[in-house]
Image: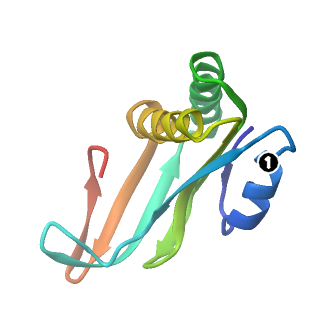
Amino acid sequence: MVRLQGESIDVAALLQAVRGDEDGAVALFTGVVRNHNAGRRVESLVYHAYPEMALREMRKVEDRARRRFAVSEVQAVHRTGELRVGETAVAVAVAASHRDHAFAACRFVIDELKQRVPIWKKERFEGGEAWIEGSS
């Protein structure tokens, strides 16, 4: 399952949603808004998305992860809107029988989301704001 949402990500609920009794491992990645970038003090980030296309691409990433790795469940959630320092911007949870599969799939999903999904990030910092490119 994949989601875009404006409200906070409930990481505990995400972990509970992916875990099954057959799973020996659950890997979790959370991307959190940090207070600095490129030598500037960050005040907030604003995420914009083209929802229809973003969700379609997120589903493709989820599907590729399921086919490529021995996982039982994959979920990814990305925030939109303005986020303050310390807030979770993205979360990926993957359940599998073994940790190697869970870790590898989790890394794959976040890397693919950053590369392929049309979600844009604007950084607000002391004295201005700028669109941020790349997978930072």
* Residue 10 seen in render: no
Percent x, y of residue 89: 52, 61
Residue ID at (65%, 22%): 63
* Residue 129 seen in render: yes
Percent x, y of residue 97: 71, 35
Q: Is residue 117 above or below residue 121?
A: above
Quadrant in the rendering for residue 123 = bottom left
* Residue at far top of view: 67
Quickly name the residue at label 1: 19
* Residue at far right of view: 21
Asked if residue 26 lies left or right of residue 110, the reply is right
Q: Secondary structure at mark 1?
A: loop
- Amino acid type for the residue under numbered disc 1: Arg
Q: Is residue 64 above or below residue 77?
A: above
Percent x, y of residue 2: 69, 40
Residue ID at (29%, 55%): 131
Quadrant in the rendering for residue 9 = bottom right
> Between residues 56 and 75, which one lies in front from this camera angle?
75
Residue ID at (53%, 45%): 49
> Between residues 114 and 72, which one lies in front from this camera angle?
72
Percent x, y of residue 75: 69, 42
Asked if residue 134 lies left or right of residue 34, the reply is left
